Image: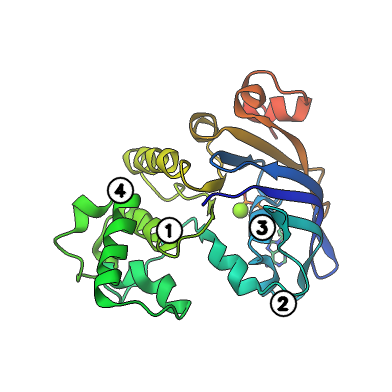
Amino acid sequence: MSKLIEVTDLDIYYGDFLAVENVSMTIEPKAITALIGPSGCGKSTFLRSLNRMHEVIPGAYCKGNVTMDGQNLYGKNVDPVSVRRRIGMVFQRPNPFPTMSIKENVLAGVKLNNTKISKSDANDLVESSLRGANLWEEVKDRLDQPGSGLSGGQQQRLCIARTIAIQPDVVLMDEPCSALDPISTLAIEDLMNELKNEYTIVIVTHNMQQAARVSDRTGFFNIAGTGKPGKLIEFDDTEKIFSNPANKATEDYVSGRFG
Ligand SMILES: Nc1ncnc2c1ncn2[C@@H]1O[C@H](COP(=O)(O)OP(=O)(O)OP(=O)(O)O)[C@@H](O)[C@H]1O
Ligand SMILES: [Mg+2]
């Protein structure tokens, strides 16, 4: 079930380096929130801090608060592994496990979580996840063949199926279409639109048209210069960000006058 995420005064560090400063943002359930901004402004860093993937990097940590439906995800007794189970992530390059079949790929996250599952439940989960990722019809006759034998766009949908198989509340996507052709990109965008009925979705994208097409809310991050922290400059309805942003830097960026 999709959830509300609230970020308050979040500072994100790599050791001594403050990479992202003082972000506060409410991420609505059943909606797509897009994060845009120039390279190095901290979009991926911010995204990874939402499901506590950031801290797997040695020396990396955060200050501030992230809550999901009121629960502090950084609370003392909260297991980061359980946070990552509830907030799944899809990466820029489709990364199916090459030696695993399509079916095994879909179940990989579930197996990693040590969830015991019967054969028939596993088959049902494979089907529902692949249907949810709009891939079922294309692969139902070759579930035992390697995931690496699919096209790039199919592999990315396989990775989305793998993420939704663990039944998360939130799906984070870091430039999920940047390695894909325009047709596959549109297929993923259609899929995001369907997924938002059930999940809270946050995507990072460099593609302005994509942000404008798929998202409900858009956050623009910017950076004052190398070594300076990235900041959330403006966060509003996507339509407002692209038609009438409050901030000059946002306007320059979305209209392509940046840098
Ligand atoms: N593992 C890391 N260790 C140290 N610094 C890092 C690490 N990953 C990112 N950074 C730094 O944090 C800052 C933000 O990087 P990040 O990757 O979040 O930017 P981004 O907005 O996602 O950029 P891009 O659009 O190029 O993907 C950069 O200065 C980057 O060099
Ligand atoms: Mg990035």
Query: Upstream in the sequence, badge 1 or badge 3?
Result: 3
For label 1, the residue is: 164
Q: What residue is rendered at 30% in x and 77% in y? A: 118
For label 3, the residue is: 50
At numbered mark 1, what does the secondary structure look like: helix, strand or loop? helix
Q: CA distance from mark 3 to mark 2?
A: 17 Å
Residue contact at pointers 3 and 2, CB within 8 angstroms: no
At numbered mark 2, what does the secondary structure look like: helix, strand or loop? loop
Query: Upstream in the sequence, badge 4 or badge 3?
Result: 3
At numbered mark 3, what does the secondary structure look like: helix, strand or loop? helix
Q: Residue 197, how many percent across, how many down? A: 46, 41
For label 4, the residue is: 134
Q: CA distance from mark 2 to mark 1?
A: 28 Å
Q: CA distance from mark 4 to mark 1?
A: 12 Å
For label 2, the residue is: 58
Q: Few, some or many C-alpha atoms within 10 Å of disc 3 (few <14, some 14-19, many ≥20)?
A: many
Give the amino acid type for the residue marked by disc 2 in the picture.
Pro
Q: Nearer the viewer, residue 2 or 159?
A: 2
Residue contact at pointers 4 and 2, CB within 8 angstroms: no
